[in-house]
Amino acid sequence: MLSKKKIIDFYISVSKIRKSEEKLIELNPEQEMRCPHHYAIGQEVVAAGVCVNLNDKDQIFSSHRCHGHYIAKGGCLKSFMAELYNKVTGCTEGKGGSMHLIDTKKGMMGSHGVVGTNIPIALGASFYLKYKKKKNLSVVFFGDGGADQGVLYESLNFAALKKLPILFVCENNGFASFSHISSRHAQKDISLRVSNFGLKSFKLDGNNPVLFLNKIEKIISYIKKNNKPVFVEAKVNRFMAHCGQGEDIGPGLRSKNDLNKMRNSDPLVSLQKYLITKKLLNKENIKLIDEKIDFEIQAAVSYAKKSKLPGKKDLFKNVLA
Amino acid sequence: MRKLSYLDAIREGIQQSMQKDDSVFVYGEGIEIASGPFGVPLNLEKEFGSKRIFDVPLSEASMTGLGIGAAINNLRPIMIHFRLDFTLLTLDQVFNAASKIHYMFGGKLKCPIVIRATVGQGWGQGPNHSQAFHSIYSHFPGMKVVLPSSPYDAKGLMIASVFDNNPVLFLEHKSLYNSVGLVPKKFYKVKIGNANVLETGNDLSLLGFSSMLPLMKKVSRELKKKKINCDVIDLRSSYPLDKITILNSVKKTGKLVVFDIDWSFCGVSAEVSAFVSEKIGSKLKSNIIRITPPHVSHPVSYALEKYFYPNENDVLKKIYKIL
């Protein structure tokens, strides 16, 4: 049974991801953030729903589309903005940019820019958790493009073989950059494909926020209780382009009409409606929450803009440990 | 001091590392099997249990990621490949993650993984079972690459690799496995990046790694008969290179022969040669010579192998031309 606090924290997380990325889009014309941005607008429910069920000792690993995961896991917003502004105060001191976010204090253990690279690394983290008898789990987020990679299937096998506490989360938005799933998969049902690997496999609707939260809460407590791996495929809609400001409308991609349908079923809006209908929050409460988030984001942007760029000596820092 | 074989020295280095620190664990294909390939970590399972030494599926890429994910959490994995060739399946994990994870995350993570692999020269191992290509690993910032030539170094470099905070490729050569040498019983490290000057002479600098050392020593012995004295230097690691020792030697002799088990083109021998010519090129008294396999894939037939791997006579012929 979902607690009121969890649902509200979940909303805060979804809204914070949305508003942070909208701020990036708003500020983009200034051309001060010089690194590729892969927005997760439309997909926030999955990051928020998973991470609201985790603590700081649970570890997550992400891909190129990582802003949402970082924010949902509680990653420092100032370090996030500073990183996107290429500043030395950023979470990787200007080395990684938007595709390599990290906040180890919060259990955000890094995102990787090559699709699938993060999957076996997350497997290794779950191995560590079991090795040291920790009561935590490791989570790896990847897209349907990640489900094209051989390392996923190798990792599923090993996780099932060794009974490792890991949650594989495939955010299926139907596209691997510009390539539609129909041109890549013979068996389009990813969760079905995975179901024979010796671990539990679920297909969830990442566009139905409360249902998703409900199910993922049970799945995560199953992993923590049983120390066993689980695979989740979450169907999601990506509103923005694969990379940058566009919408990826065109032949072989999607139509304006399809995109409008996606935007009309915006999970953020349906979550707000749910909160109000169930009298968990009223419009005024939501407004106050959102204003507080806006304030935090603005403070992070100011911090990032005021921060220094790295200097020449920083180029040679941290080559060897 | 007692004598140990190169292979037993490696095994003892692993064993003592595991005794020293319970964050050290060992895994690889078939390594639980006592009679498995080379019987390398033989009997260690009895001492440490299957939690710390275990067999894995033939999933080289994800099993490398397994080590990386453990290493960034302060465990110290030793991943074993019975052929260096098999590591080509792992390069995304090694070069997009392990080698740069410390740098690209601003120093927030360290990746102390040892990738232990064998160069399998001999008995017709051929194009997928005997390659040496440490140049690739040496190319990427953040990696260390060690190539021991003696039992003493094999143990000391193994321990140093395990307790180094960076990813290390530990490359051992099958032809050295049965070579025997003095190895202390105690736990000791050989510092990575320090070359070992085995013989000194004023006429010629012979630099090389791993299985090239026996050849270099033979060549040196032969030249000594003609009153030509060589520095014989085991570089021990291709990254970091012991640049000071290299320069001191070549400054003294003015003549350089670089031996490598990897190809010459874009190889570590090219790097050493370029480095020397950039730093003290004007002090060289002759052209640099490189002794490496030719630019063809590794053949199986022993009739072809004898032309592929450098031999003493060919090396001497090349050297006589610069004397």
Image (cartoon, coloured by chain):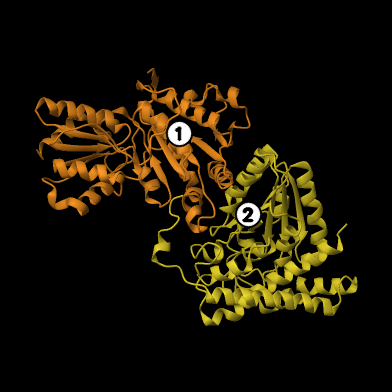
Chain colours: A yellow, B orange
Is any part of residue B118 visible from this angle?
no
CA–CA distance between discs 2 and 1?
Answer: 38 Å
Identify the residue under disc 1: B159
Indicate left or right for B317 with A13 as reference. Answer: left
Label ID, residue B265: none
* Labelled pair 2, 1 in contact (Cβ < 8 Å): no
**Residue at image point 39% right, 17% down:** B2
Q: Is residue A269 above or below residue B86?
A: below
Label ID, residue A147: 2
Which SS class for mark 2? helix
State which quadrant residue A10 falls in: bottom right
Q: Position of residue A313 (x, y in %)?
A: 39, 63
**Label 1: few (<14), some or many (≥20) within 10 Å?**
many
The count of marks equals 2
**Residue at image point 55% right, 57% down:** A112
Which SS class for mark 1? helix
Chain containing the residue with disc 1: B
Q: Quadrant of the N terminus of chain B?
A: top left
Q: Nearer the viewer, residue A310 or A62?
A: A310
**Label 2: few (<14), some or many (≥20) within 10 Å?**
many
Look at discs 2 and 1 and give the one toward the viewer.
Answer: 1
Is any part of residue A18 visible from this angle?
yes
Q: Position of residue A206 (x, y in %)?
A: 75, 63
Q: Amino acid at mark 1?
A: Ile
